Image (cartoon, rainbow, N blue to C red):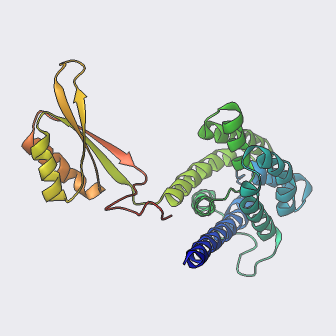
Amino acid sequence: MKKTRGFIKNLSLDKRTLKDYLLILLGSTLQAISLRVFLIPAKLASGGVSGLSQIVNNFTGWPIGLMVLIGNIPLFIMGWRFLGGPRFAARTAFSILTFSILIDVPLFFLPTNGITGDIVLNALYGGVTSGIGFGLVYRGRGTSGGSDILARILSSWRGIPVTQSYLITDAVIIFLAGISFSWENALYALVMLYVSGIAAESISQGSNILRTGMIITALPDPIKDGIFTRLGRGVTIMDGRGGYSDEEKSILLCVVTRAEIPHLKALTRELDPKAFLIIGQAHEVRGEGFLPIGED
């Protein structure tokens, strides 16, 4: 029986690993397509090593994919030291190799000179495509190399927030792109990076964003019963005390969908007009009534 359980556990781990690598493969492919179809023809520099490789290619003609691979080697070594050794290495190496190869290897279904000459369309669709690619790589528990590794190193080593680390690394590349291509192209590249970030966050965290409701009230029982019966949601009750009034109150915490927010507001207003209601955003909720805790 123990051997059977161990076999099933290992099999599930293997399935998860296979799923991760498939996500990384698809994500890296989309990033390469974005670079070749939208960004390179429009001279829009992406962030990190690939953006720097585009700039060098503009002057030398050296293969972008090869430069991406070479440029990621020192960052990969640093990431090995600071970001988790072998666990970090396998997925990151797979992502970098796939991305680098697909940039330089001719793909018959991709137009060689891009789809459109409109720089706005190239910035928007390039950002969306690359952002989806980044998001899929993140969902596969991998990194895309380049500024992704550098940003995480700066965050863990110097305590710099990841968002600021990305801003620092990409700002340098965009400045160099402005000198190399044009300042107008650099401005469009900023738009592309912003769109890419939104798309990556949406894909990596999922679109099913839920809401948290925190109700501070002196009448917890009727509101609790109303949430149970009308919304079918659970409630956690905590004790609280007003800092100004010094009155003892209850704090009700519940998680609802976006569509249930108006019903929660109406219910609270009806049962306790003096209640204090806070609506927050939850990117992910796991447990009874939502996603299983162990499922990704």
Up the image or down, 291 lies above or below 254; here it is below
Query: Residue sitting at 64 percent across and 66 percent down?
Result: 27
How many numbered tags mark residues here? 0
| Residue 220 falls left or right of residue 107 | left
Query: Residue sitting at 90 percent across and 59 percent down?
Result: 62
User: Where residue 89 sits in the image (x, y, percent)?
Assistant: 76, 57
| Residue 82 falls left or right of residue 224 | right
Q: Nearer the viewer, residue 49 or 284?
A: 284
User: Where residue 160 sits in the image (x, y, percent)?
Assistant: 64, 33
Which image quadrant is residue 168 in? top right
Which image quadrant is residue 11 in? bottom right
Up the image or down, 215 lies above or below 262; here it is above
Q: Is residue 75 at all visible to an observer of this figure? A: yes
Q: Is residue 266 at all visible to an observer of this figure? A: no
| Residue 137 falls left or right of residue 268 | right
Q: Nearer the viewer, residue 24 or 3?
A: 3
Q: Nearer the viewer, residue 141 or 33?
A: 141
User: Where residue 70 sits in the image (x, y, percent)?
Assistant: 88, 56
Query: Residue sitting at 58 percent across and 54 percent down?
Result: 196
Query: Residue sitting at 25 percent across and 20 percent down?
Result: 243
User: Where residue 166 sits in the image (x, y, percent)?
Assistant: 65, 42
